[in-house]
Image: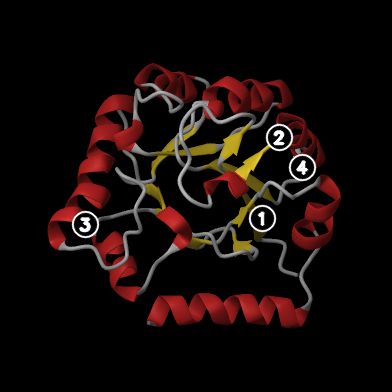
Amino acid sequence: MDERRTINLCFHGIGTPARDLEIGEAHYWVRTTVFHAILDAVADDPRVRISFDDGNASDAEIALPALRERGLTATFFVLSGRLDEPGSLSREQVLELRDTGMAIGTHGHAHRPWRGLDPAATHAELEDAREELAELVEQPVDEAALPLGRYDRALLATLRRLGYGTVHTSDRRWARGDAWLQPRFSVRDHDTVARLQREVLRPPTLPTRTRGELVGLVKRFR
């Protein structure tokens, strides 16, 4: 396995949600004890990069103290349309993330798939949301995480045209560290440290790796 390979772990919510969840979203909320155990397991692994989607309040209330305690950094992909909403990050919390060395990326405005949007909705999700976050944190926002992990070549072409430096998916496979498109493993409610060590942190078999690459290829060229 190429030493430049990266394992991107993505968290969504931690602990008890403080807002109404979308259908299916509960599967991506993990217990605080499990979250801490996973961080302990990967804290010294240079292959692992950590990110958070959806802009939940748990990012600042639970994740940030745990990361700082272990000397870790992460990228937080924020939904501009949820800022200051109950159970979601406040603008003040986003600035706290920035001020403690965390990176801020965009997850769009309304947590809807970006694939197949009309021009007005595309502008709102890919440009307006990004600009709002950039104004808030007073620095460029050039990383994006695709809501629900959906994409096609038209969307990727648009993201490249708009100058995004890195785009993160939900394809469950290892990444090349310097790649523009970064697949991630979303941590789910049934995951444990043992499961992640067995299914994610261990180098994939050739069939598993080939299958994952084929799935990504189909998405990129459909």
Q: Give the amino acid at mark 1.
A: Ile
Which label's residue is closer to the chain start, 1 or 4?
1
Q: Give the amino acid at mark 4.
A: Val
Quarter of the figure with residue 62: top right
In what element is the residue under mark 4? helix
Q: CA distance from mark 3 to mark 4?
A: 36 Å
Mark number displayed over residue 42 = 4
Which label's residue is closer to the chain start, 3 or 4?
4
Q: Quadrant of the C terminus?
A: bottom left
Q: Which residue is mark 3?
A: 122
* Other-residue count near label 4 (Cα within 10 Å), few / some / many at <14 / 14–19 / ≥20: some
Q: Give the amino acid at mark 3.
A: Thr
Q: Which residue is mark 1?
A: 7
Does the CB distance between marks 4 and 2 fall below 8 Å? no
Relative image position of residue 202 (x, y in whole percent): 81, 61
Does residue 114 sit above or below 153 in this rendering? Answer: above
Q: Nearer the viewer, residue 187 or 87?
A: 87
Residue drawn at 42 percent across, 76 percent down: 220
Q: Quadrant of the N terminus?
A: bottom right
Q: CA distance from mark 1 to mark 4?
A: 10 Å
Does the CB distance between marks 1 and 2 fall below 8 Å? no
